[in-house]
Amino acid sequence: MPASKEEVAAFLKKFKKFAKEAGMYFIDRQVNNTALTSLGLTKNDAKQEIMTLSVTNYCKGPEPDHNEPGDIWVFGKK
C-alpha cells in the first residue's frame, strides 16, 4: 500500500534534517557511478537534487531494505 501524502512529507522532513546534520554519501558501486555519469551529474549535483525532492516526486515505499536495516523509499524526477 502506498504511503499517504502526510507520511511522505514526514519522511522527507526527517530525512532532510538528518542529511543536513549527518551528511549524505553514495555507496561506491559501478552501477551508481554509471547512473550519475549518464545523467551528467556529480555526486554534489545529485545531493542537491535529492534535497529538493517533494511529496510530488514520491513513487513508492516504504519497503524493507534487503541489504541494510531499515526501509527504502523511492522518488523520481524527470
Image (tube, rainbow, N blue to C red):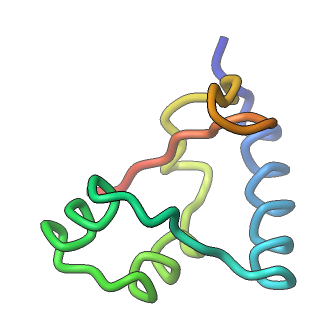
Outermost residue toward the top in this view: 1
- Asked if 24 appears above or below 15 in the picture, the reply is below
Q: Classify the position of the C terminus by image quarter.
A: bottom left
Residue 4 location (% of width, % of height): 74, 29
- Please name the residue shown 49% across and 47% down the image: 75
- Which quarter of the figure has residue 18? bottom right
- Please name the residue shown 75% across and 75% down the image: 19
Q: Classify the position of the N terminus by image quarter.
A: top right
Query: Going by the image, does 71 lie left or right of 56?
Result: right
Query: Going by the image, does 33 lie left or right of 29?
Result: left
Outermost residue toward the left in this view: 38
Query: Going by the image, does 2 lie left or right of 40?
Result: right
- Asked if 56 appears above or below 28 in the picture, the reply is above
Query: Going by the image, does 65 lie left or right of 15?
Result: left
Residue 65 location (% of width, % of height): 66, 30
- Asked if 61 appears above or below 25 in the picture, the reply is above
Residue 69 location (% of width, % of height): 80, 36
- Asked if 64 appears above or below 56 in the picture, the reply is above
- Please name the residue shown 62% across and 39% down the image: 73
- Which quarter of the figure has residue 43? bottom left
- Please name the residue shown 52% across and 49% down the image: 56
In the image, 30 versus 10, the foreground residue is: 30
